[in-house]
């Protein structure tokens, strides 16, 4: 038994407290986390690549991105078929469905900006 955390499991309680305080600080500062940035980047990558593939009549461009994402997921241990299904659903939502992000209600002190701003920022 470890003496570091005192009684058994005490270290986990301190970690939970630190994590809770960290999340509260991020929320207060309105600071995005890694996953927030990753969601924006993935959305941008998929939509821009799909638009470019259509504009250049070269669907292979999109396949390169899909293959790279799937290879990365499989390398992490995810099921190949399940990964492909999830990615296909995301692509359908982002490209065909015009799907944007779910708003984070704790950030809604100001009027929300559309994720379209990101896509309109640099015209293809």
Image (tube, helix red, strand yellow):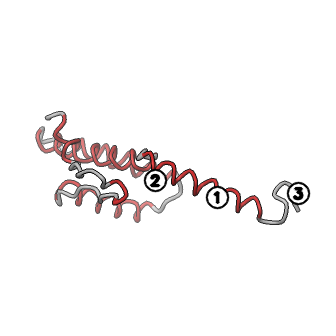
Q: Element under label 1?
A: helix
- Separation of disc 1 and disc 3 at Cα? 19 Å
Q: Element under label 3?
A: loop
Which sits earlier in the primary sequence, circle 2 or circle 3? Answer: 3
Which sits earlier in the primary sequence, circle 1 or circle 3? Answer: 3
Foreground mark, 1 or 3, reads 1
**Left/right of residue 5 with respect to residue 39 in the rendered view:** right
Foreground mark, 2 or 3, reads 3
Residue 73 screen position, x and y as percent: 46, 53
Which sits earlier in the primary sequence, circle 1 or circle 2? Answer: 1
Q: Element under label 2?
A: helix
Q: Residue at x 48, y 54 (%)?
A: 74
Residue 3 has which mark? 3
Q: Is residue 20 above or below residue 48?
A: below
Q: Is residue 8 above or below residue 95?
A: below
The residue carrying pointer 3 sits among few (fewer than 14), some (14 to 19) or many (20 or more) residues within 10 Å by Cα, namely few
Q: Residue at x 41, y 47 (%)?
A: 30
**Left/right of residue 55 with respect to residue 115 in the rendered view:** left
Which residue position is annotated with label 2?
73
Q: Are marks 1 and 2 in contact (CB under 8 Å)?
A: no
**Left/right of residue 50 with respect to residue 33 in the rendered view:** left
Foreground mark, 1 or 2, reads 1
Q: Are marks 1 and 3 in contact (CB under 8 Å)?
A: no
């Amino acid at each position: 038994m470890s003496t570091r955390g005192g009684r058994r499991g005490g270290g986990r309680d301190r970690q939970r407290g630190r994590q809770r305080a960290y999340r509260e600080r991020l929320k207060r500062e309105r600071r995005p986390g890694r996953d927030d940035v990753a969601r924006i980047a993935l959305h941008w990558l998929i939509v821009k690549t799909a638009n470019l593939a259509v504009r250049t009549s070269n669907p292979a461009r999109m396949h390169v991105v899909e293959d790279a994402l799937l290879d990365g997921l499989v390398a992490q241990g995810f099921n190949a078929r399940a990964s492909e299904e999830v990615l296909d659903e995301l692509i359908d939502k982002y490209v065909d469905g015009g799907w944007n992000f779910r708003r984070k209600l704790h950030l809604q002190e100001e009027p929300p900006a559309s994720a379209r701003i990101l896509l309109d920022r640099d015209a293809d």
